[in-house]
Amino acid sequence: MLIGREYEQSELLRLTEMEEPQFCVLYGRRRVGKTFLVRETFANRFAFQHTGLANAKKSEQLREFKESLRAAGMRITVTPKTWYEAFGKLQEHLANQPSGKKVVFIDELSWMDTPKSNFVSALEHFWNGWATARPEKDIVLIVCGSATSWMIKKIIRNRGGLHNRLTMKISLSPFTLRECKEYAQHLRLELADKDLLEAYMIMGGIPYYWSFLRRGESLAQNIDRIFFSPDAPLADEYSALYASLFKSPSSHIAVITALSKKKAGMLRKEILAETKLDDNGLFDNTLEELEQCHFIRRYYAFGKKERDSVYQLMDNFTLFYFRFMLENTRHDEHYWSHTLGTPIHAVWAGLAFERVCLWHLPQIRQALGISGVITSAYTWHTDGTADYPGTQIDLLIERNDNIINLCEMKFADAEYSITQQEDEKLRNRSVVFKTITRTRKAIHVTMVTTYGVKHNAYWNNIQSEVTMKDLFGS
């Protein structure tokens, strides 16, 4: 059963309705569901499909390509020696197919591009020299892969024969909370919304991770089994994740490690100082690739220029890895359960909940009734002075209707109760922000919480509320 992905599925189906040949690139991080989406959309009805081999030599890749041709119905006994010959055999196979659109699906494309194999050049020749030249105009080529950086460099931004040849590109994002809830219902899991939210805070919207959740177990039991048990299926996921996306992941891991230590993120120069990486184009590529894979985000502080952009760790699973998996030095198979209710868990929960909120800005805007209003999201920080205390605001939503939502994000087990001290802090924060930025817009203090805010004596300063229910969306 395909959960969500309505837009992506409609786009893929549209490929078969176009008169001209179609070349589509589908990319996204490991385990996000790219292959499943394509196979479900076309019900596995392909004129040809193939999956590249991980860490295999050119000869092994070509041998497997031959086997895919045989599986598709071609009589072939000799393994091609080059990719030009291999694609020539594919052309022969497709030319002998019945009339109508012919969908060709090649998965894990980057793995096929082994050193000195001329794979990309052969692919270019197949597309430009044959697929687009056919008078039938019947070829629909869909390629995808987890190595996002390779897909973008070698295919999407190709400056050779594939330049401007793509007819569609789809970046597949992780599930939203609503889609994860639908998936949990499909798995027939009996978990409360707060459990689903906390599962998202741990695993993000990666369907593959969610597939390990079992019926009849509490969330704590599931997390212990999935990540900390002796045979935990995702115990080694962190190293596999970055190795699958980047051919030389050491610089990427160095950046991620540095950002894991800073809640609000770091400036480019701060990352360089922390990682000791060289300040060059390779470093900029590392940042760009991490951003493209949704591991980090680059954002601008309110009132700052682009050169002052901040990079922040956004991947829920990576954050969980650093806060818990890496800290489990005694190999406690119930480590997660043993941290529940501790300060370690509380600090992580607050940070992880903020990340979930940032992943769901469209849902927050919808809850505030401003989906149709032009908005920009920022953070803001000022150091303390003799006149003002240091202030950090993790989410500001500047609106085109003369309002700024100053968002306070709080994860709680019940209605959140604002104390007198916190009320004063919220008031002071608004005053400091307005005074230093000199904004003329109205400031609406907005609470984003799990179960809402208790309407006590210190609630009146709150202009609007967003709850966990809103984050799940409609």
Image: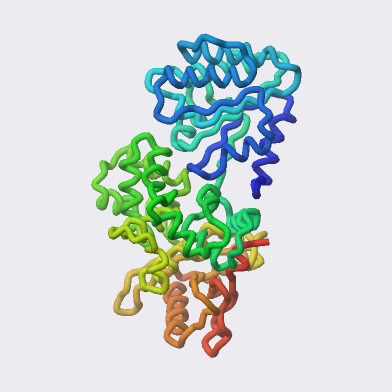
In the image, 13 versus 36, the foreground residue is 36
Residue 190 lies, with reference to residue 343, above or below; the image says above
The spot of residue 126 in percent (x, y) is 57, 16
Residue 310 visible at all: no
In the image, 362 versus 375, the foreground residue is 362
In the image, 405 versus 192, the foreground residue is 192
Residue 232 lies, with reference to residue 217, above or below; the image says above
The spot of residue 50 in percent (x, y) is 56, 26
The quarter of the displayed image where residue 421 is located: bottom left
The quarter of the displayed image where residue 180 is located: bottom right
Residue 318 relative to residue 23: left or right:
left
Residue placed farthest to the bottom in the image? 457
Residue 172 relative to residue 231: left or right:
right
Residue at image coords 42%, 65%: 351
Q: How is the image coloured?
A: rainbow
Residue at image coords 49%, 83%: 418
Residue 82 relative to residue 321: left or right:
right
Residue 39 lies, with reference to residue 450, above or below; the image says above
Residue 241 relative to residue 261: left or right:
right
Tag count: 0
Residue at image coords 56%, 27%: 106
Residue at image coords 39%, 22%: 57
In the image, 229 versus 145, the foreground residue is 229
Residue 203 visible at all: yes
The spot of residue 420 in percent (x, y) is 45, 88
The spot of residue 226 in percent (x, y) is 45, 54
Name the quadrant of the C terminus.
bottom right
